[in-house]
Amino acid sequence: MEIYLIRHTRPQVEKGLIYGRSDVALASSFSTEAAAVLKQLPEKIDAIYSSPSSRCTLLAGAIVAASGFTGRSYVTDEALYELNFGDWEGQTWDTIDRAASEAWMKDFVHLSPPNGETMLGMEQRISRFWDTLLQESYDKVCIVTHGGVIRIILARYRAIGLKDSFSIPVAIGEVFRLSV
């Protein structure tokens, strides 16, 4: 199975905004960035999965419209959401409690933002999705999601520890092709 991990295009957000689960608008460059993504995908796609965030579903819809996708539409799965930053959602990094954010950054695997999610919890939900996906008989699959989700999948695929997953660069609109 070939799996194409696709990070959404550029969101229209202020620098430093914490928007993991927040639904934010896409930048005006969406059409250009989506076209660049489409050029990297195969002609025939058997399944398309997307985070429920509109910044992902808009790109998933563009893939459906432009490709030889054999299904009717993409499937959203909550396992593909970005990290839940809880009370920090919608704030900027420079406005949240500094001591709390520093503690979280030192152990984001096990600690969560207030009323948010740990990376370990995020990894567990993504792993359930991934293990189920690998049981399918698809040839080519697209997954439109977020940087954090892609880092966790790539860390697992490359046998990198979760605490080191942020060392994996994942650019806006980047496509990763995995053979599993």
Image: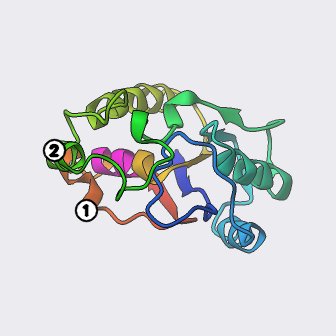
Residue 79, above or below 25: above
At a point 74% along the width and 50% down the height, the residue shown is 58
Q: Identity of the amino acid at label 2? A: Ala
At a point 17% along the width and 47% down the height, the residue shown is 99
Towards the viewer: 32 or 159: 32
Q: Is residue 57 visible?
A: yes
Helix, strand or loop status at disc 2: helix
Name the quadrant containing residue 128.
top left
Residue 58, above or below 136: below
- The answer to whether residue 57 is left or right of residue 139 is right
What is the span of residues highlighted in magenta in the rendered image? Answer: 151-156
Q: Identity of the amino acid at label 1? A: Ser
| Residue assigned mark 1 | 167
Towards the viewer: 40 or 57: 57
Residue 51, above or below 68: above
Residue 29 in picture, x, y percent from top left: 72, 72
The number of discs equals 2
For the C terminus, give its image quadrant: top left
Q: Main secondary structure of the magenta part?
A: helix
| Residue assigned mark 2 | 103
